[in-house]
Structures are given as C-alpha cells and as structure tokens.
C-alpha cells in the first residue's frame, strides 16, 4: 500500500503512544531527533507530550505518514511564535521508521511538508541538521540550501560537539508566478 499523509490527525492515546515509540526507535537507530541513544520511551515521552501540546493548541502542526495503517514517518511544522517570522516555519523531528529507509518515505514526507506550507501560503521552510550524519546531502537533493552553521552547537557526548546546520527552502507561491508572468507581459508591451 502506498504512503499516505495526514495533517493534524486526532491526537488519540494510540497515536501518542505510536509517536513516542517511533521517536524512541529513530533515536536508538542513530537518528538526530533531539536525543542521543540509547533512550527509553519514558525518557522521550515528556518532550513528545510538550511537542504534542503545541499541536493540540493549534500553534504547531503535525504531519504523519502512514503505510498500511502503520505510522512510518512524521514531522512537526513549528510556528516561530514571533510576528516578524510568521511567513515561514521550522520543520522539526523529521522521522522515518528504522528499516523503512530506502523506500522514499523521507523524501515524500518532505515534499508533502512543502506542499502543506505552500497551501498555507508560507514563503519558506527551515530545518536544522546535526552535522556528522550526512543529512545535509538529503536536504540539498530536496532543494534546501545551507544558510548557516553554528560550530559546536550540539554536544552529543563528552568531547563530541557537532555543528548545527541551518537549511532553508524558499517556496514559490502561485501569486509569485502570476506576478512574474504579469510583469513579463507588462514589460513586453511597454514602450521602450
């Protein structure tokens, strides 16, 4: 069955448990989603509940990917909580079920997030990446570009500080295309 997406699904107890389990599994498989392995569900649950509370309040958005009824991917579309940044969002906790990599779930999830952002008429998306995992190449292939690097911002262990990369994707809006087309037409008919 193909991957399907749900934006802001009902936050049932079952979904909350699935999210905590996925978050734990991704971390323990080496994923850079806010923790360093090994972790237990009890360690992940408080951050998951805080994150889901912002979704329940309508501040942030949750995008999940489901395959054959099973949660296999998710990310959070986080509001910046600052009026001057209301035109873009941050993608957080991008996760794909370990063992499902290579099926295109991650790329499909990111494309769906960009489509959602476009529907919300956002101008851009940002994702931060823990250096040392090679994930910047994944995001580059999806059109993101590195716009910043904070050296040693993430301490994943004693003597193991990692750079945090800031990746940015500008979203073309339908009104941008109309404006550009209109400008080109006006230029072509303007007297020289």
Image (cartoon, rainbow, N blue to C red):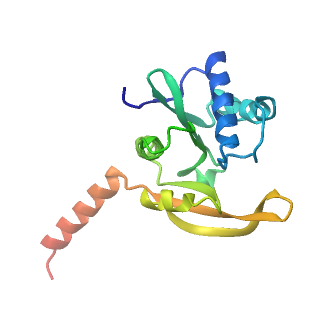
Q: Which of 192 and 143 is in front in this view?
A: 143
Q: Where is residue 33 in the image (x, y as percent from the top left)?
A: 67, 46
Q: In this view, does 41 lie to the left or right of 14?
A: right
Q: Where is residue 99 in the image (x, y as percent from the top left)?
A: 54, 38
Going 72% across and 33% down the picture, which residue do you hit?
Answer: 48
Q: Position of residue 37 (x, y in %)?
A: 75, 45
Q: Quadrant of the C terminus?
A: bottom left
Q: Which of 125 and 46 is in front in this view?
A: 46
Q: How many marks?
A: 0
Q: Quadrant of the N terminus?
A: top left
Note whether 109 is above or below 129 in the view shown: above
Note whether 87 is above or below 22 in the view shown: below
Q: In this view, does 89 lie to the left or right of 104?
A: right
Going 52% across and 60% down the picture, which residue do you hit?
Answer: 168
Q: Which residue lies furthest to the top in this view?
A: 13
Q: Can residue 147 be seen in this view?
A: yes
Q: Which residue lies furthest to the front in this view?
A: 99
Q: Is residue 57 visible?
A: no
Looking at the rendering, which quadrant does residue 129 occupy? bottom right
Q: Which residue lies furthest to the right in this view?
A: 158
Note whether 49 is above or below 165 in the view shown: above
Q: Position of residue 40 (x, y in %)?
A: 78, 33
Note whether 162 is above or below 29 in the view shown: below
Going 61% across and 62% down the picture, which residue do you hit?
Answer: 166
Q: In this view, does 169 lie to the left or right of 183?
A: right
């Amino acid at each position: 069955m193909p991957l399907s997406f749900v934006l802001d699904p009902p936050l049932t107890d079952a979904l909350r448990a699935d999210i905590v389990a996925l978050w734990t599994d991704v971390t323990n498989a080496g994923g850079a989603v806010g923790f360093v392995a090994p972790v237990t569900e009890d360690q992940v649950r408080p951050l998951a509940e805080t994150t889901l509370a912002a979704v329940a309040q309508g501040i942030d958005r949750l995008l999940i990917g489901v395959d054959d009824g099973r949660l296999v991917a998710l990310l959070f579309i986080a509001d910046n909580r600052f009026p001057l940044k209301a035109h873009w969002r941050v993608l957080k906790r991008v996760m794909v079920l370990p063992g499902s990599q290579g099926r295109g779930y991650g790329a499909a999830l990111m494309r769906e997030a960009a489509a959602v952002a476009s529907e919300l008429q956002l101008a851009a998306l940002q994702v931060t990446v823990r250096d040392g995992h090679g994930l910047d190449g994944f995001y580059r292939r999806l059109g993101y570009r590195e716009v910043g690097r904070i050296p040693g911002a993430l301490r994943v262990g004693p003597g193991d500080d990692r750079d945090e990369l800031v990746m940015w994707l500008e979203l073309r809006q339908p009104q941008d295309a109309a404006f550009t087309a209109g400008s080109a037409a006006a230029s072509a008919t303007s007297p020289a």
